[in-house]
């Protein structure tokens, strides 16, 4: 996706290396030039690495910075594990994010495409064999991100709940009386399931906390998610019933989850920098 850095921060980063150079000199003791903060921000950066179902390719995002406009844009790349070559897969003006593999080897991602008011963010698919990206679902109300079942029939995603004072809030916005210095959190990100064929949306979770990164189990029975209360949870996809939760994340909130191929284990990523693997049936931690 495209991102513009604020002008004040650009000025700060421009002046910071000058002070460092005056204090330390142009070279370090070994005679090698030190990299400035400004130069480091111009370096490309990668993320969202995902291994293909056949274990032959890795899809990832690569962010590059325009030194003149001071804007960054992120595109999707594919690295071939056999040849060691990396190829750029997408190149839209606004960039792309969140690449993941579909079972048939295509890549699903989120991107905002179009011009002006017609520009919209939605799910797209592209093949490694070439050709243009196509909209995953021809429905303007379809979610713009999420995880897809192996049969392509359902999408699990997060959406923000309505405020309990929605009518009052909308009236205050109309009267421009909506400014707050601080406010109690009133909306939360919950898990929903979108039916590709019918276009129907079903809310799976509720509660006064946020959910993130919903993922389907390979057998399609469960949906796992991370939450801001340092817990990973698994839900029944059809009923929304809570199946189990794993709370051994003392170091921070859970921001990503993934099932094993046989749906028997759950891996989690946490803001404490650790990954953990849980046995779902035994309800216990296996690795950290």
Image: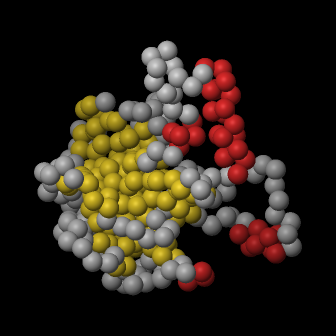
Q: Name the residue at 66% across, 46% down.
A: 10
Q: Position of residue 87 (x, y in %)?
A: 27, 59
Q: Is residue 194 above or below residue 139?
A: above
Q: Position of residue 249 (x, y in %)?
A: 42, 34
Residue 229 visible at all: no
Q: Name the residue at 45% across, 58% down.
A: 74
Q: Position of residue 62 (x, y in %)?
A: 40, 53
Residue furthest to the top in view is: 29
Q: Is residue 159 above or below residue 28?
A: below
Q: Position of residue 39 (x, y in %)?
A: 53, 40
Q: Is residue 75 above or below residue 44?
A: below
Q: Is residue 170 left or right of residue 118?
A: right
Q: Is residue 72 left or right of residue 82?
A: right
Q: Is residue 127 left or right of residue 83?
A: right
Q: Name the residue at 34% across, 36% down.
A: 275
Q: Is residue 234 above or below residue 275?
A: below
For the C terminus, which image quadrant?
Answer: top left
Q: Nearer the viewer, residue 209 or 124?
A: 124
């Amino acid at each position: 996706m495209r991102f513009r850095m604020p002008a004040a921060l650009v000025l700060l980063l421009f002046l910071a290396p000058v002070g460092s150079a005056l204090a330390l000199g142009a070279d370090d003791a070994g005679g090698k030039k030190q990299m400035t903060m400004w130069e480091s921000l111009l370096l490309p950066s990668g993320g969202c690495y995902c291994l293909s179902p056949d274990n032959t390719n890795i899809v990832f995002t690569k962010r590059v910075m325009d030194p003149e406009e001071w804007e960054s844009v992120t595109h999707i790349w594919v690295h071939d594990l056999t040849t060691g070559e990396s190829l750029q897969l997408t190149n839209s003006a606004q960039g792309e994010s969140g690449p993941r593999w579909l079972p048939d080897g295509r890549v699903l991602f989120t991107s905002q495409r179009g011009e002006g008011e017609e520009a919209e963010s939605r799910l797209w698919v592209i093949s490694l064999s070439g050709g243009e990206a196509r909209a995953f679902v021809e429905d303007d109300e379809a979610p713009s991100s999420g995880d897809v079942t192996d049969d392509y029939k359902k999408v699990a995603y997060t959406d923000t709940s309505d405020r309990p004072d929605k009518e009052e809030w909308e009236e205050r916005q109309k009267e421009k009386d909506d400014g707050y210095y601080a406010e109690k959190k009133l909306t939360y990100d919950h898990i929903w399931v979108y039916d590709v064929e019918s276009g129907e949306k079903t809310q799976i979770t509720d509660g006064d906390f946020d959910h993130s990164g919903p993922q389907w189990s390979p057998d399609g029975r469960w949906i796992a998610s991370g939450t801001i209360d340092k817990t990973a949870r698994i839900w029944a996809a059809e009923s929304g019933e809570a199946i189990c939760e794993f709370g051994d994340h003392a170091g921070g909130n859970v921001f990503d989850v993934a099932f094993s191929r046989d749906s028997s284990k759950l891996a989690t990523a946490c803001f404490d920098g650790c990954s953990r693997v849980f046995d779902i049936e035994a309800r216990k931690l296996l690795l950290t």
